[in-house]
Image (spheres, helix red, strand yellow):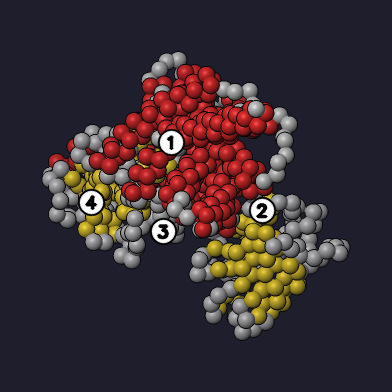
Amino acid sequence: MQRLAREEPRFLLLQESKLSKTISFLIYFKGSTMSLSLVLLLLPGILSTEVCVNISNGVVEMKLLDLVVTDERDDKIFNCMYKDEPCYINCTNMLNGEQLFYKNSNACSPVSSNWNITANFTIGPNVSCRVAACTRNQSELILKSVNQSRNGMDRMVEIHLLRLMCSDLFSEDQYLQILFLKVELQLIHLIMNMMKEQGKYVPGDMHQLDLKYMAFNIFPIGDKNLNRNETITGNENPNDNLIEVSQPDSDPSVWLPEDALGKIKEDRRVVNLVNYQSTQQFELHQEEFVSIVTRIEFLGMHSLSNLKTPIEMTFDIQSNISLMDKEVKCHYMEEEGFNWKKDGCKTSRNDTVVTCKCNHTTAFSVLLVPQPIPPEHWEILSYISYIGCGLSAFFSALSLMIYVVTRKPREEPSIFIHVSLSGALFLLNSSFLLTEWGARWNPGWVCELIAALVHYSLLGSFSWMAVEGLHLYLMLIKVFNTEYKHYQLKLSLFGWGIPAVVVGVTWSLKDVKQMYGLSTLTMLDSNQTTSICWITDITYLYATNVVYFSLVFIFNSGILLIVAVRVCCMVTTPARKGLGCRTATTVAGITCLLGVTWGLAFLGSGYVNLPILYLFCILNSTQGAFIFFWILGLARIERKRALEAKNASVSTNDSKVTSVK
């Protein structure tokens, strides 16, 4: 290879075709002695280009399209930018298939190519390059083309280069992240099979392979290792039934059960411990990793599952992590839905070392997670929720019955709004009590119907809480004696109509994607699961429920604050002193009507704030009962006012009769 001294400027003149446009191309080298790594060329229809290359002080400048490439030797990747947008570039020596990111290349000659958002071209007789824009389509094409390759090692480096150069795209696009993990897993087994075909597996001999972004530790396990109960490394067993398959003092140390290994044929009994340099590719849902990620793979995609003697792994974790309201837990990658889970794994910790015992093989790591609810508190909260929902449904039904029986033609709209909220809460509590029952019922449409009903009643409850806030604003804050036409009808269209539209649209799209149905919940720190009828898509759950309630909560909280300030100001006047207790009761009742207590969910930091959780369950599961007593109080006040008005009318009539006499 031609070497160019860093201190000596040199110029290369390549043939030029008749072109008016130019391309700018920059490669920056770090080091005292470097050579020209890349020279590109990309305009539609270019057959040859005259390029003036200036190499001085480690910087190469070239007039070619709007492409800027920086050679980041410390990271062993190029920083590729096309018109200020990130791009992907990879160059390979066609003679030996090696990538040119780790060594100098030959001087460049004229090249030809067409540039759109991807280009393949050659530099000189032996160097082939590929440039592509960082888009989903281009990245998907590269990943799938890599998957069809037989050259697993170079292709493994290639997909990691793609992920690093287009890091922003991959961090935002979960589809590409999952596709990357699938392709990577297939390449791992392609490399393992390739090494088997080359005859590199000798039982008892360890093989290490550094692929820059991950390290392979391959251990062929012979029958003699099993029969003699010996470890490959020679270290002492922590358990007579376990065999160590990791380097001494490595992170992590991994021990596999001897009985499970004995069921695999000797020619297939090859285990590969893949240790990753970074956890970035596994951060699918903003997980917090405190250890490296390691993957346990067997030749021929064989896997171990439902092990009686679990796999044992010890991870070194960060010593400076903050465990406030959190704890460390062993997790595995579930490779169907690509989620990190912890069922089937047990965790024990000693200072900066975490021991994981798991009953299957896949990718493992230690994550930082919120502290779970202790089992005894979880049971108490469950009882509070079910009893509270039953009471709330009962009192909500009473509110509806009383309203129907005693309804007056020109009744105050406030009563109608309170009863409508009670109706929504009755539907919510009643349908909630059916969620577990419906999960065990056939046919499946019953569970879907219950899930849709729960969703409708929940949105309806939030809507009528917003109506309570709006009505309070119009009556107490705006204070306009305006007669609104069809006022109750308009409120009903909002309170019942918006939830109906949302649920109706969701149900109509069931052939495209099923949103309602059976949802399985896994209890924290256990393998216990429970099935309920609810929304099956977590993203849709947050988009329709959390976002909608957040808007209602912000609006109603503002209304409550203004009302509370005005009521307190009224109490401080001399004529109204001594009404503090009644005022506090009024504010508490309005808080319940507006549903502000639901905002306690925002204050319950994860699963650790038990007082907030108890308040949340008690106040919200008994909201229907509170509204019932609030309606009774209003009815009592109305009767008292009617009686006073009647007595005043009688007194007036008696006075008139007396005066006539």
Kindly identify the residue that appears in the image at 55 percent across and 68 percent down: 72
Q: Is residue 35 above or below residue 402?
A: below
Q: Quadrant of residue 125?
A: bottom right
Q: Which residue is mark 2?
A: 133
User: Disc 3 to disc 2, how far (Cα)?
Assistant: 26 Å
Label 2 or label 1, whichever lies nearer to me, is 1
Circle 1/circle 4 CB separation < 8 Å: no
Residue 348's mark? 4
Circle 3/circle 1 CB separation < 8 Å: no
| Badge 4 amino acid | Ser
| Badge 1 amino acid | Phe
Residue 376 or residue 653, whichever sits in front: 653
Q: Is residue 116 above or below residue 359?
A: below
Q: Position of residue 598 (x, y in %)?
A: 47, 43
User: Disc 3 to disc 1, how far (Cα)?
Assistant: 57 Å
Element type at mark 4:
strand
